[in-house]
Image: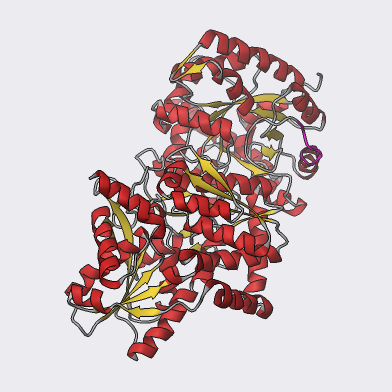
Amino acid sequence: MKKIKVRAQTASRLSKARKATRIARAFASKGCDASSHSSLARAFSSANGAIFMPYVCCGDPNEKFTMHLVSALVTSGAGAIELGIPFSDPIADGKTIAAASGRALSGGMTPKKAIAIIAKIRKSGIEVPIIVMTYYNVVYAAGTSHFLSAIKAAGADGLIIPDAPIEESGSLRKLCKFTGIDFIQLITPNCSDSRLKKIASVASGFLYAVSVLGTTGARKNVSADAISLVKRAKGISRLPVAVGFGISKPAHACAFANAGADGIIVGSEIVNIYSKYVKGRKIDEKRALSAVSRFARKMANACTGKN
Amino acid sequence: MKRYFGKFGGQFVPETLVPALKDLEEAYTKLKHDKPFQSELSRLLATYAGRPTSLYFAKRLTAHAGGAKIYLKREDLLHTGAHKINNAIGQGLLAKRMGKTRLIAETGAGQHGVATATAAALFGMECDIYMGSTDAARQAPNVYRMKLLGANVRIVDTGSKTLKDAINEAMRDYTANFRTTHYLIGSALGPHPYPSIVRDFQSVIGAEARRQILAAEKRLPDCLVACVGGGSNAIGMFHSFFKDDTCMVGVEAGGDGRRHASRLTGKGKIGILHGMITYLLEDKHGQIADTYSVSAGLDYPAVGPQHSLLMEEGRVKYVSVEDKEALGAFHLLSKTEGIIPALESAHAVAYALLLAKKLDRKKIIVVNLSGRGDKDIDHVRKIEGER
């Protein structure tokens, strides 16, 4: 009797596994990844308009503030968090985030500590997707497989490596797929349609549309090229499209949401807002968090396409 | 063109730069075998830069060492004072053909900044040079030289305030302005296709040296010695000798012993920086380490990817020479031969002296004297005055 029950359970488990494989294959054939059926995909599909995805530089100016900042952003309407693990030479970042990374590093932030912070965020009950953003050398130095399983175990859902274009990300993508991490590829306004297609065919999670030619950093306006990039990407791929680099105002978020963007990523402007309250490794948390929360609420609202 | 040297090299850059680098690769591939382009380049190298440079038998230096014959490849005699002009004219001409109107570059010792500013003036282009504030302070004459040549010198005050940070800023500028701007990388490093392009433009050094030593000695040298920062003067010298039996030595900066820039002598690890996978110096968390050398041109935490391959293959031997040995060679060459070498090149001279002593008098060593020391005079006087 017992034996039969065990066998039945095994059979049911097997059939579930087979079903999962079928779903995975179906997704793969559509240019999606099975793992995007995870929390990232759910976050995009259940959103009303675009989701607000703020970037947080882990450890700027200290660990405690990072925890409180993430919590305040989520309370204010963030649908996902992009958590930056600082690197000494962030070539894709402009002055603001480069300075934030510098502060975090001089405060002693390390990849290990950042991964522990992800675990703490999860432990505090925050469930929105967490996407790790860092540079390739940080991952490589830790050992790629080791790094990926560590962030996965801590509770991260995706990974962005701005210095790993598709030609160099093959092994990273394979290991991410194996680990169950969405590897997010960037697309830019100067990508041809054929290159967009090529990138979309290997990307998972979402396409990260870079709205400017250049580095991260708050800009005053949204370019027509950026709007057209979102539209082109939506036309080419079934993957969600999140826009980032340069977005600093609710009007920007609104314009991209109306163009069809599924996510709006804001980094430098948030750093600009709270860094006014930074003194060395200390920060006037109360004022910094209330200023960031005000901004985040406006942005989250604008992401619905209404401004 | 090959993207990799063995497992080193590649194109680890933000997506924005991928199409820009593809354009560069296509333009270069076309012009590499374009007769009018190559003859224009040769004409400028001869009439403007002063090529060929001489291969000089350093008789008194040889006597001082008391061993193998030491020849100096006199890149220090070139216009602007270093081998950097070979690459600056080559890439400047390439940029002009690509329709770019502006050149940007990073500089450590200032020699590449001066060479790029010179090329910009020669070709009538705008020019911005990024330079770390530490380097700008120790190479002050070159800062003024660049300004005289019409370039904007942009002082970089982030990170270690040296060459690495100047490259970061230049890459950021290139990412934003690639449509009008060519990033004239000064060494055989960075993302593909730069390591190959810079090597090709510098390979004139070895091609000439090979002809010259055959004419002078009726045989090839036993050993080549060159300093390695990013590695362009070394790769330019070595390139024409890879098929020969000639031994080759790349000399890295040993700094003060504790702090250094020795990446290929067992202290470096494989990692990714400035668009390439190569040997570099980092901490255990993968953060790029601060390097130190008395010579700004060797003060860099990574190395051109081809050197990483040559080290692993054992084709080139890499050694390091400390500040005090380099300074010793700086003075010795000045007094014995009347040639004031750049502090970078003085590292190669210092190693050549050690090597010459070990070899018998029939052996021949060719040292690439990559630059002249005028730029270092104030700096050396200051540090030696302080002692």
Image coordinates for residue B215, horizontal then vertical, percent:
39, 90
Name the side, left or right, on which A136 lies relative to A22: left
- Over which residues does the magenta segment extend? A221-227
In the rendered image, the vertical position of residue B364 relative to residue B198, given as above or below: below
Say how the picture is coloured.
secondary structure
Residue drawn at x 43%, y 76% as measured from the top left: B206
The reply to whether residue A237 is visible in this rendering is yes
Image coordinates for residue B295, horizontal then vertical, percent:
36, 53
Comparing B266 with A272, the one in front is A272
Q: Quadrant of the N terminus of chain B?
A: bottom right
Q: Is residue B281 magenta?
A: no
Comparing A239 with B384, the one in front is B384
Q: Quadrant of the C terminus of chain B?
A: top left
Comparing B48 with B156, the one in front is B48
Figure disc tally:
0
Image coordinates for residue B100, horizontal then vertical, percent:
70, 58
In the rendered image, the vertical position of residue B29 relative to residue A266, given as above or below: below
Residue drawn at x 82%, y 32% as measured from the top left: A259
Comparing B303 with B258, the one in front is B258
Image coordinates for residue A104, horizontal then vertical, percent:
45, 27
In the rendered image, the vertical position of residue A151 relative to residue A288, given as above or below: below
The reply to whether residue B26 is visible in this rendering is no
Q: Is residue A225 magenta?
A: yes
